[in-house]
Amino acid sequence: MELYNFNGVLAIKNVVPKPKAMPTMATVLYRKMHRRLMHVGKATVEEACCRTGIQLTRKNDDLCEGCIVGKKTDEIGKEAPV
Ligand SMILES: [Zn+2]
């Protein structure tokens, strides 16, 4: 409430609080969401973010070192046969 002058008479003005600003849509890197969702595929990351209102950036950055290492079959450092 605040006081104001209404034709020489002090009056009380009800001040309605402004509504809080709507939350803005979150923007997250594709790679970060891929890691947070335990390295799921690109389609799953996109669908999950679409459902929750998260906007993805850098969607072409889908080369993940952890997934590459996890899917490889050869051992690292294994000596070549003589
Ligand atoms: Zn991954």
Image (spheres, helix red, strand yellow):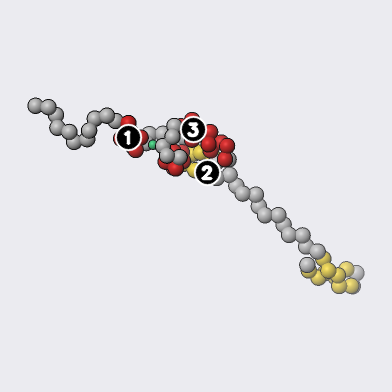
> Which one is earlier in the sequence, the residue at label 2 or at label 3?
2
N-term mark: 1 or 3: 3
* Amino acid type, callout 2: Thr
Which secondary structure lies at badge 2?
A: strand
Q: Position of residue 30 (x, y in %)?
A: 46, 38
Q: Is residue 27 above or below residue 43?
A: below
Give the label on residue 44, or none. 3
The image shows residue 66 at horizontal and vertical percentages of 34, 38
Residue 28 in view in this figure = yes
Residue 31 percent coordinates (x, y): 43, 39
Measured Cα–Cα span from mark 1 to mark 3: 19 Å
Closer to viewer: mark 1 or mark 2: 1
Left of 27 or right of it: where is 66?
A: left
User: Which residue, given by chain and number where applicable, does mark 2 sit on?
Assistant: 27
Q: Three-letter amino acid code at disc 1?
A: Gly
Q: Relative to 15, say whether 8 is above or below.
A: below
The crowding category of the residue bearing disc 2, from other C-alpha atoms within 10 Å (few below 14, some 14 to 19, many at least 20), is few
Tally of marks? 3
- Cβ of disc 1 within 8 Å of ligand 1? yes
The picture quadrant for ligand 1 comes to: top left
